[in-house]
Amino acid sequence: MKYTYTVEKKNFLNFQLYHVSQSAEFNIKLKRQPLVIMLINLAIAVYFAVDKNYIISMAFVAIGILWYFLYPARIKRLYESRFENDINVKFEKHFDREAELEITDEYLKTSDKGGSSQKSYKDILKIVHLPKETLIIFKNQQTFIL
């Protein structure tokens, strides 16, 4: 059975974002950093409250709370921008190419104008379904983006 598909820039970006989201280090940073910034703002707010400067104190409380809730959206845009730049440099020749996936009883084979790759089903580590693409990740960390 053969399937024909086109890999676009957005597919590479979604793969990179998925890959980083699976990193334990990234997830710890994502949870810790907004909390630390909020606590620093609250400490500064307490300092100004003790000094009876309540307006500045409330401003720091508001900034801390806003930072805590807006940080995930900010970090997502930051990573998207960073990965988009990397993808433009490294994978530009792969954008908008028509590729073909062949499924047989023994292996998966992909091919496009740049070459082909053939992998056994035994080598599949996991299959990940994202909203707009499917990732087939192999034991050697090679990935088919469908």
Image (cartoon, grey):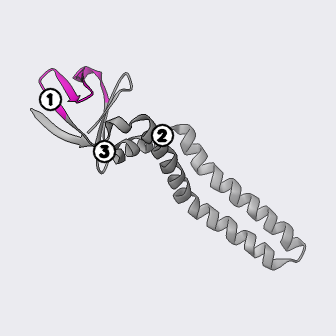
Q: Which residue is nearer to you in this view: 73 or 40?
A: 73
Report the magenta stretch's main SS: strand
Label for residue 103?
1
Q: Which amino acid type is shown beneath numbered disc 1? A: Ile
Up/down of 74 relative to 86, above or below: below
Rounded to the nearest whole Å, what is the CA distance between mark 2 and mark 3? 15 Å
Q: Tell me residue 13's x, y (percent).
A: 40, 45
Q: Earlier in the sequence, mark 2 or mark 3?
A: 3
At label 2, the amino acid type is: Asp
Q: Is residue 50 magenta?
A: no
Q: Residue furthest right?
A: 51
Q: Secondary structure at mark 3?
A: loop
Q: CA distance from mark 1 to mark 2?
A: 31 Å
When the figure is inspected, residue 69 is found, relative to residue 133, above or below; the finding is: below
Upstream in the sequence, badge 1 or badge 2? 2
Q: Position of residue 74 (x, y in %)?
A: 55, 58
Mark 3: give few (<14), some (14-19) or many (20+) Cα within 10 Å.
some
Residue at 38% over, 41% down:
15
Q: Is residue 72 left or right of residue 3?
A: right
Answer with the quarter of the image where residue 135 lies. Answer: top left
Q: Residue 112 at what x, y percent from top left?
A: 22, 31
Q: Give the left or right position of residue 21, taking residue 104 as reference.
A: right
The reply to whether residue 19 is visible in this rendering is no
Q: Marks 3 and 1, Cα distance to the nearest angstrom?
A: 21 Å
Q: Quadrant of residue 102?
A: top left
- Type of amino acid at the residue the image marks with label 3: Glu
The span shown in magenta is 100-125
Q: Mark 2 packing: few (<14 Cα in 10 Å), some, or many (20+)?
A: some
The furthest residue to the left: 1
Task: Report the residue marked by disc 3.
Answer: 8
| Residue hosting label 2 | 86
